[in-house]
Every structure is written in structure tokens, then in C-alpha cells.
Image (cartoon, rainbow, N blue to C red):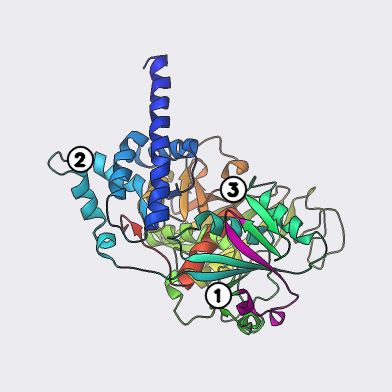
């Protein structure tokens, strides 16, 4: 190919991506249809992000997919009477162009692939959400909910509950939402309403409520009713403590963004979200590590069977550790997080069994906290029921990341240059590093990257949707 052709191809892709962008907004704002490309969200994506998402297709299919191929499919979607849903345009376009039949037009293809959505009369009422706590996870959840906000999206971020209320507090809260040292600037506009103690983010009025305990709050005075309270504090992790939220007027359900204790259901979305029942009042979204490893472990166990294993997590330091040496009630965690690798325990391996009971008693685990602010890695050393090669295992996991019900949780890479900072912003629960996979006889070692902040927050949002009964289906349906 001539040098000029490279530039021409890029300009063509850019032109088509620029045409795609307003169509994505039209589908989302007017129909409530969220467009994905091989699991990657395209709503609010920039032109360059759209082109980059298309380039990911080669990793999965072995073939290029260009905006030239997806543009006519997206145009056709705007003409269909779709109910609110998620549509993976990568899956659709790849299937259409791969097996294109000249006698079968694009419209007929989409009518068949999206039959259920076309015949659905699904209508979901908006549901109120309150974030109790506004730390790392709370602010990322706010970003995600604001990003998704629109006429077609049923979850409404109505309020954030924090301690304090000193002079300047509101502006500082807004500033922390506006600027993030790891995840970059907020994508949009943020202003502060001092008189009403609120943050307005991309048009979303978010009430800031100052309270020292759930008992101090009546949500109904802010017009908030039957709300889902998302507890990001980790102060209470059992039913007794979290039930305090349910005593607040206007609260209906509670989701904990930490491992739950006792009889609380620990949910890893994509694996066991079916355990969430309509009358469940308190649910846990488990931990970031549990969410990262459980989908991959389920995939491996389903095909090869896991007899035993050990999971070691190399985890970025957290706010629970000290920046410099100081007293800490936990072993080793008092030592400087910015200067040391810190060996500590993790309950993630045992927690896997709560979401995947067939692995109960089969896994052990430990964690090494390292001096990086975000992105972690799980190293799963597994003994299997059957023999497997690294190539076979990688081929299987690549397919699971592409065409399986776990494709929203598992990502896969074979880049020889991937490092932790490249995973920042990943919306998947875990990313399998195929180059690092080791397999010999019935033993294997898998290396799983995960953004322990953003990737986990995406999983939490999925659980929120499931709890409130507003989870939309994704098409085409994967089996």
C-alpha cells in the first residue's frame, strides 16, 4: 500500500466516525439504545475513540472492522422502532459483512437479529440513586451515572451523602469530581449551587447532604423516594449495620461496594447476578479483586474444571494504608505505601466461593500491595481436571471475551508491551494477558489485569441496574 493510501484510509475512517457520533447520540437520547462495539461503550465517545474501538476488532476476529462497515448498520438502527436496549454494533457488523448475502439486505438482517427488541414494549420508570460516601469509588460511580444520564437511562443520581459541611467543602467536593490524578478530567461541565448545596454536572442536579449517620437523613424532603442507597464507606458490612440506611425515609434498597459479611449476598455481575431477587433489600457488589478473577475462573472451570489453586494479587496501594510509616491496626499496613511492597492478606479467593460455590475450598490467596495508585494484577496458579496448552487456553479465553455472556466482564490482550497504566479506564472486570499465560499438562498460570477503581465501578453500576430492575438486554444475544 502506498504511503498516500494510509493517510487516505485514515481520513475516510475519521469522516465516517464523525458521521457516527451524532447517530449514537440520537439512538441513546431518543430511543434509550446504548451502542457498544465488542463490549466497549461508544456513547459520548470522541471521533478518535470510535476509530480506536474499531481497531480492537482485529484482536478478536482476526479481521479489521472499519467505521465504513459500521456506519450503514448504525444508520439502519436509527430507522428501527427499538425498545431501550444495548446493541453491540461490532458483533452485528462483523456477522453481517462476514456472511453477507446479496439477496438478504441489511434491514432484513437487523430485523432478524433484533426481533426481541423490536417486539418489546418495555418501559422502565426512572429510579433514584443516592451515593453514601464520595471517595474514590463514589466519585467514579458519579462519573458513570452522569455519563449515562439521559431520557433513556432509568437510574438518576439524585444525591450524595458526606460528612462535614465546613466552609469551602462543597467547592472542594466539586473539584475532586472535576479533576482526578489517575482518571483525568471530568468529561463535561461542573458548577456549584452554594445556596441549595448542590453540584450540577452536565445538567444533573446532585444534592449534597451533610450527615453523620443514616438516622440524620430524610430523603423525601429533597424529593427522593424509593431510592437505592449505594454505601461506599465500608463502615458497615453486615445486615445490621447496613439496615440503618433502610430506616431513612425515602430509602428502599442498599448496595454495598465492599465484600458483605454474614448472610448478605455477594454478587459478581456476569456470574451470579441471578441471585438478586426483587424483594432483596441489601446486596454486596463484592470486592474489586473478586470481580476481576471470578469471571475468568468461571470460564476456566466450566471447560477444564479447577481442582485447586492459589491466587496472588499484586494490588495498587489504597487509602487504608499510610503514606509514611505510622501506626496502623493492621499488620504491615502502617509502613509507607509509597515506598514499599507490602505483603497482606486478601479474602478474595474465599469470596469467589460466594459467587461461584463450585470452587468452595479449592482456592487460597494473598496480596502484595505495591507503590502504584491504580490498576492491579491477579496471578492465578490453577490445577485442572484436564490437560491444556497455552495456545488452547488463550484461544478459549479470547473467544469468551468476544462471544460469550461473560464478554462484558472478560477482556483479552496479546500485546507484548502492555503495562499497568495501559489498563487505566478499562471497563472490564479483568483483562487476561495472553502473552503471559503458562500451561503444562494439567497446570496453568493466568495473569489478569484489572482497573481496581474504574473497572470495579462499572461492575457496581451493572449491579445497581439489576437491583432496581432496570437492566436492559444486550443484542445480539450471546449463548
Q: Is residue 454 left or right of residue 47?
A: right
Locate the C terminus and report the quarter of the image it occupies: bottom left
**Residue 21 point in image, percent of width and height:** 43, 41
Point out the tag, 1 or 2, that comes first from the N-terminus: 2
**Residue 472 point in image, percent of width and height:** 39, 63
Q: Is residue 368 left or right of residue 310?
A: right
Instruction: Tell me how far mark 1 sits from mark 2, CA to CA.
Output: 47 Å
Note whether 474 is above or below 187 in the view shown.
Answer: below
* Highlighted magenta segment, given as a residue range: 201-222
Q: Residue at x 36, y 62 (%)?
A: 473
Locate the N terminus and report the quarter of the image it occupies: top left
Disc sitting over residue 453 in the figure: none
Q: Residue furthest right?
A: 326
Point out the tag, 3 or 1, that comes first from the N-terminus: 3
- As helix, strand or loop, the secondary structure at mark 1 comes to strand
Disc sitting over residue 227 in the figure: 1
Q: Which residue is mark 3?
A: 188
Q: Is residue 228 left or right of residue 52?
A: right
Note whether 416 is above or below 457 in the view shown.
Answer: above
Amino acid at each position: 500500500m502506498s504511503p498516500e493510501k494510509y493517510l487516505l484510509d485514515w481520513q475516510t475512517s475519521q469522516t465516517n466516525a464523525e458521521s457516527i457520533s451524532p447517530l449514537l447520540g440520537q439512538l441513546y437520547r431518543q430511543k434509550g439504545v446504548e451502542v457498544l462495539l465488542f463490549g466497549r461503550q461508544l456513547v459520548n465517545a470522541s471521533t478518535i475513540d470510535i476509530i480506536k474501538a474499531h481497531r480492537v476488532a482485529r484482536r478478536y476476529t482476526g479481521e479489521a472492522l472499519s467505521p465504513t462497515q459500521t456506519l450503514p448498520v448504525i444508520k439502519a438502527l436509527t430507522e428501527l422502532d427499538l425498545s431501550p436496549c444495548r446493541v453491540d454494533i461490532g458483533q452485528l457488523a462483523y456477522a453481517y459483512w462476514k456472511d453477507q448475502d446479496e439477496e438478504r439486505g441489511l434491514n432484513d438482517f437487523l430485523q432478524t437479529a433484533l426481533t426481541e427488541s423490536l417486539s418489546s414494549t418495555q418501559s422502565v420508570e426512572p429510579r433514584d440513586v443516592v451515593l453514601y460516601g464520595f471517595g474514590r469509588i463514589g466519585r467514579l460511580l458519579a462519573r458513570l451515572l452522569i455519563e449515562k444520564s439521559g431520557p433513556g437511562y432509568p437510574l438518576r443520581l439524585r444525591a450524595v451523602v458526606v460528612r462535614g459541611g465546613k466552609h469551602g467543602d462543597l467547592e472542594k467536593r466539586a473539584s475532586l469530581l472535576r479533576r482526578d490524578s489517575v482518571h483525568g478530567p471530568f468529561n463535561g461541565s461542573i458548577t456549584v449551587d452554594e445556596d441549595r448545596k448542590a453540584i450540577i454536572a452536565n445538567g444533573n442536579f446532585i444534592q449534597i447532604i451533610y450527615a453523620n449517620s443514616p438516622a440524620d437523613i430524610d430523603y423525601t424532603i429533597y424529593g427522593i423516594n424509593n431510592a437505592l442507597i449505594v454505601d461506599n464507606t465500608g463502615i458497615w458490612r453486615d445486615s445490621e449495620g447496613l439496615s440503618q440506611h433502610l430506616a431513612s425515609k425515602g430509602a428502599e434498597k442498599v448496595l454495598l461496594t465492599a465484600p458483605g459479611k454474614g448472610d448478605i449476598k455477594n454478587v459478581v455481575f456476569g456470574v451470579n447476578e441471578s441471585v438478586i431477587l426483587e424483594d432483596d433489600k441489601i446486596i454486596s457488589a463484592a470486592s474489586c479483586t473478586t470481580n476481576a478473577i471470578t469471571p475468568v475462573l468461571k470460564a476456566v472451570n466450566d471447560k477444564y474444571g479447577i481442582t485447586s489453586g492459589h491466587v496472588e494479587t499484586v494490588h495498587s496501594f489504597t487509602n487504608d494504608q499510610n503514606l509514611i510509616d505510622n501506626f496502623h491496626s493492621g499488620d504491615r499496613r502502617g509502613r509507607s505505601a509509597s515506598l514499599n511492597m507490602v505483603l497482606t492478606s486478601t479474602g478474595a479467593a474465599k469470596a469467589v466461593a460466594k459467587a461461584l460455590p463450585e470452587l468452595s475450598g479449592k482456592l487460597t490467596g494473598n496480596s502484595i500491595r505495591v507503590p502504584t495508585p491504580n490498576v492491579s494484577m491477579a496471578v492465578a496458579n490453577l490445577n485442572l481436571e484436564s490437560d491444556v496448552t497455552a495456545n488452547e487456553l488463550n484461544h478459549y479465553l479470547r473467544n469468551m471475551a468476544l462471544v460469550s455472556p461473560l464478554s462484558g466482564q472478560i477482556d483479552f490482550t496479546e500485546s507484548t508491551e502492555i503495562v499497568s497504566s495501559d489498563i487505566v479506564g478499562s471497563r472490564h472486570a479483568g483483562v487476561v494477558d495472553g502473552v503471559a499465560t503458562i500451561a503444562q499438562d494439567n497446570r496453568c498460570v493466568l495473569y489478569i489485569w484489572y482497573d481496581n477503581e474504574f473497572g470495579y465501578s462499572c461492575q457496581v453500576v451493572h449491579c445497581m441496574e439489576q437491583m432496581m430492575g432496570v437492566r436492559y438486554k444486550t443484542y445480539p444475544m450471546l449463548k
